[in-house]
Image (tube, rainbow, N blue to C red):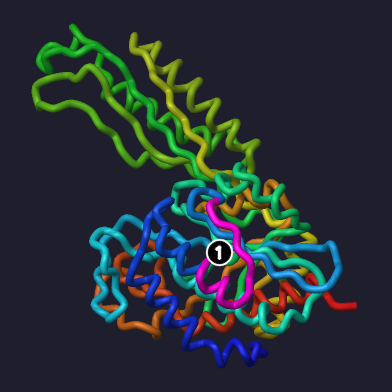
Amino acid sequence: MKLVEPILSFQAEIEAIRRDLHAHPELCYEEHRTSEIVAERLTAWGIPVVRGLGVTGVVGIVKNGTSPRAIGLRADMDALPMQELNGFAHASTHAGKMHACGHDGHTAMLLGAAHYLAQHRNFDGTIYLIFQPAEEGGGGAKRMIDDGLFERFPMDAVYGMHNWPGIPEGHFGVVSGPMMASSNEFRVTVRGKGAHAAQPHRGIDPVMVAVQIAQAWQTIISREKNPLHTAVLSITQIHAGSATNIIPDHAELVGTVRTFTTEVLDLVERRMQDMANGIAAGFGASIDFGFKRNYPPLVNHPEQTAFAIEAMRAVVGAAQVDADVEPTMGAEDFAFMLQAKPGCYVFIGNGEGQHRAGGHGLGPCQLHNASYDFNDNLLPIGASYWVRLAEMSLPVG
């Protein structure tokens, strides 16, 4: 492993920043303290900053030389609305808020790289340090883009990184093409006719209609979609009724759809609506169909992925880079940035949990659980990757 030596020397300060952020988590578009810390640090290191993109986003600008080339490096800043169960000194001080996905670590890694790049500037061009709010369901990436991110800070490519369970500490994973799925949600109301449960013939039972729809929808995945194309349709909630002896007026189906391509998503959404309307009509009921597309599929660009692989190998060695990692049906709003610009998103392994005692829940490595904590051993590894990626993207001479 060839980590950047000055980053190793700076590790204690990066770790202190990370733990401070963990102790003071802020939800999407509320990252005022976090963005203030980011802006203050960047300014202290001589890096100009622009604030307010995407409400609380921060962009640092590191320039050197005369080249017009530029890249963007992005870290997310927001926490999750959940109660932390950890008892260590840097546990969340805000009830019901927790850094359970490692965005505190992502921010700290990019700050560590920023500190080095500001001091050494062994590159020719411009590096935009993108500290993004509201990844956890708020679409902060799109909000920053809508606020002019790529017009105000023109860049040739953009890169992102996320800590990942199941990948050993000191290893990276990436794949060219689709790496994370689109995130979409549906809320479908079946409107029937209420009646006494002892006289079902006098009503139109929306519960039975909902059951038929739920079963039929799964045939979209198993019989209508090309079996070589991936999709998940999960009904996660069914709501109906308030008493044991009353057939209700309506029933509700709620859930999520995940796909790796927009074409498959178009098919699934269209056929869900067709089937729901057709089945309901057959029973004399009607449908209110709601389908919301949240995040698009995250698709890595081949050229930038190959380049990112070389940068990762320069840091940890070829044996510790999985260039064909298994994609995940989880979603990530960095996908919006990859729709607008060429780029690549990578996973940095967060280990097996030895950095913290488990004690409860799913342990310190599994994302979105109350015992999670970012692995501080990753800080110099991730920061070194950012530095090597920047220097290799913008070589001197």
Q: Crowdedness of circle 1 by 10 Å Cα count: few (<14), some, many (20+)?
A: many
Residue at x-position 47% and y-position 52%: 134
Is residue 50 a member of the stretch shown in magenta?
Answer: yes
Residue furthest top as drawn: 202
Residue at x-position 61% and y-position 37%: 264
Residue 295 sits above or below residue 46 on the image: above
Q: Position of residue 365 (x, y in %)?
A: 41, 73
The stretch of residues the image draws in magenta is 39-52
Residue 260 sits above or below residue 288 on the image: below
| Residue topped by disc 1 | 75
Is residue 66 a member of the stretch shown in magenta?
Answer: no
**Left or right, 253 with reference to 175:** left
**Left or right, 346 with reference to 41:** right
In this view, the residue in front, 44 or 160, is 44
In this view, the residue in front, 39 or 322, is 39
Which element type, helix, strand or loop, lies under badge 1? strand
Residue at x-position 52% and y-position 37%: 293
In this view, the residue in front, 131 or 216, is 131
Residue at x-position 46% and y-position 69%: 37
